[in-house]
Image (spheres, grey):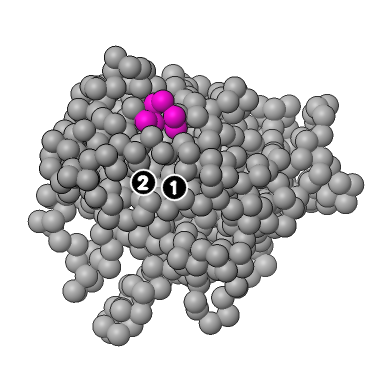
Amino acid sequence: MKRRLLLVQLATLAVLPGLAGTAPKPLPAAAIRRRPRPGAKGWPTPAEWDRLRSQVGGRLLKIESPFAACSSESACTALFKDLKNPYYINETPNVTQSLGWANAWKTEPSVYAVAAASAADVAAAVTFAGKHDLRVAVRGGAHSYQGTSNAPDSLLIWTRAMDQIVVHDGFVPHGCATAAVPAVTVGAGVIWMHAYNAVTTERGRYVQGGGCTTVGVAGLISSGGFGSFSKRYGMAAGGLLEAEIVTADGVVRIANACENADLFWALKGGGGGTFGVITRLTLMTHALPTNFGAMIGTVKAKSDDAFRKLVARFVDHYADVLHTEHWGEQTAFSASNELDFTMISQGLDTAGIRAQWKPFFDFISASPEDFAWTNGPIAFAVPAQHWWDPAFIRAHYSWAIASDTRPGAKPGDVWWAGNTGEAGEYLYEYESLWMPASLLAKGERKRLADTLFAASRKWHVSFHFNKGLSGAPADAIARSRTTATNPAALDAFALAIVAATTDGVYPGVPGHEPNATEATACIRGVRAAMDELRAIVPNGGSYVSEASYFDSDWQRQYWGPNYGRLKRIKTTYDPHGLFIVHNGVGCEDWSRDGFTLVTP
């Protein structure tokens, strides 16, 4: 660790409440039974809110719904246009990346937000919320399909302004005697695009993060975290070296393998907004491979029988050639008999990419009566240091990105164009399933291919190969095994995702109401397709960040045998349930909205 950073950290610890490594202070003995809402008994008075505003340097914001602007159609149209820009969403505390989920939730603003600029601000907000038994929401990047960074009638702790990034040539976690390793320290408000630019574009190193560049760093680590290159480097949480977190008693703690080790483990995949408010993270960095690259294309089969053959041949090709640390990202199978792939590589040049796909393409070319390309195929590799370099991408692959075009936007604020659909989307249904590598055995491949074909008759099915670590090298598996994520992920070759979403809609806005008939049909189709997959993987588990809101067995699905330990840690650090999120550790003790304690 650089001496200057060490002095800054020591000074910070000196002025913040509590000491790192100490046990949580007991909270008041009275159990929280029902949290107050605005206007109800127990809701803070204006004078009490003013005192909090003073404590946080004026950074207490009163929030209103952005959809109030929809009283004017022109303003409403402009709002929905803004909601396709993830940077607008990142900088706006009253709306989240997803606008809601049919029959489940919709994005609604908190009453107040603390726009935290420091751990001290967070500690003040947490202490205030605990004193008044308030419902709390925690938000960094606001990417949450299940609405966990969103809670009406609450106090929002918004960490977006905590966006500092420090790259270290050598870092030693506080209180440890381990060898220094290259690392990066990021504030809780940092998004991955900015982290990648600081580490990769500017310093020529790699930090394992998310594939979607506008996802918040803290939220991804808390969920385990997968990115395009996880097949090589493992889960993002596996690279966590140290965290700074404010727990429910308002104490700022350092958590690493040597101090608060149980809390440290829980933060690595135990779910965001559950164990406290993360304020800072330090992650290991890696040497860059020479190249990152891609193979992109869509091939259409001209009959159902031809598509069945195409699916079977792809399963064989993936199992024989692509099931390695070199390949991640997605292939999709649809009822229109199209196989669509956007596969991302590391460590291969363009010639190497083409060589690995040649046997599969030869199969397609040999049967022009059965197959036709409708897109691509496109193969390319670029120097890895330029993968997230906005200037380089604009010069060579401008079609791959979208940009923040608002007045005053930073030139580097771009995102992958393929992720635009996720901004401002409204979900009808979303389900996931870990696909075990045993299905790639020669005797099992036909069953897998037949099931994929059957599922694709019901709905669009995608396999995310980087979200499953079978095929990864031993070091990546070992790091990922130290996380709290369901161990099924370690033995899976992919995460199957079946989903249906729309955009331009929000409940209660005339002209933008969700289509109930369409929603019902989509939900039925998604569930039918997933039922086909679950028939061959009955207890596969799913990924906490990309799973159904309606999972009834979410404890086992998301965390498997790790849930009991997570619940004990939750009880230790948050005994009164200040931090409650939907389908998060300990939420079974509370009503769905997080306001009423239902388990004494």
Q: Looking at numbered disc 2 in the image, what kind of residue is underneath it?
A: Phe
Say above or below: 451 vs 88. above
Q: Say which residue label 1 marks.
A: 295
Image coordinates for residue 71, horizontal then vertical, percent: 27, 81
In the image, the segment drawn in magenta is 317-322
**Sequence-wise, which precedes: disc 2 or disc 1?**
1
Tell me residue 133's x, y (percent). Answer: 48, 48
Please, what is the dominant secondary structure of the magenta stretch?
A: helix
Report helix, strand or loop for mark 1: strand
Q: Is residue 346 above or below residue 426?
A: above
Using a 10 Å C-alpha cutoff, classify the residue at mark 2 as few (fewer than 14 neighbours), some (14 to 19) or many (20 or more). Answer: many
User: Image point 12% across, 43% down: which residue?
Assistant: 303
Q: Nearer the viewer, residue 11 or 596?
A: 11
Q: How many marks?
A: 2
Q: Nearer the viewer, residue 379 or 586?
A: 379
Q: Is residue 311 above or below residue 339?
A: above
Q: Where 68 sits versus 564, above or below? A: below
Q: Residue at x 40, y 58 (%)?
A: 418
Q: Secondary structure at mark 2?
A: strand
Circle on res. 333: none
Is 472 covered by the magenta stretch?
no
In-image side of 26 versus 584 (left or right): right
Based on the picture, tell me whether residue 320 belongs to the magenta stretch: yes
Q: Nearer the viewer, residue 172 or 289?
A: 289
- Residue holding disc 2: 341
Q: Determine crowd level at label 1: few under 14, some 14-19, many 20+ residues with C-alpha closer than 10 A.
A: many
Counting from the top left corner in percent of width and height, residue 326 is at: 53, 36
Find out whether the residues at labels 2 and 1 contact each other: C-beta distance under 8 Å.
yes
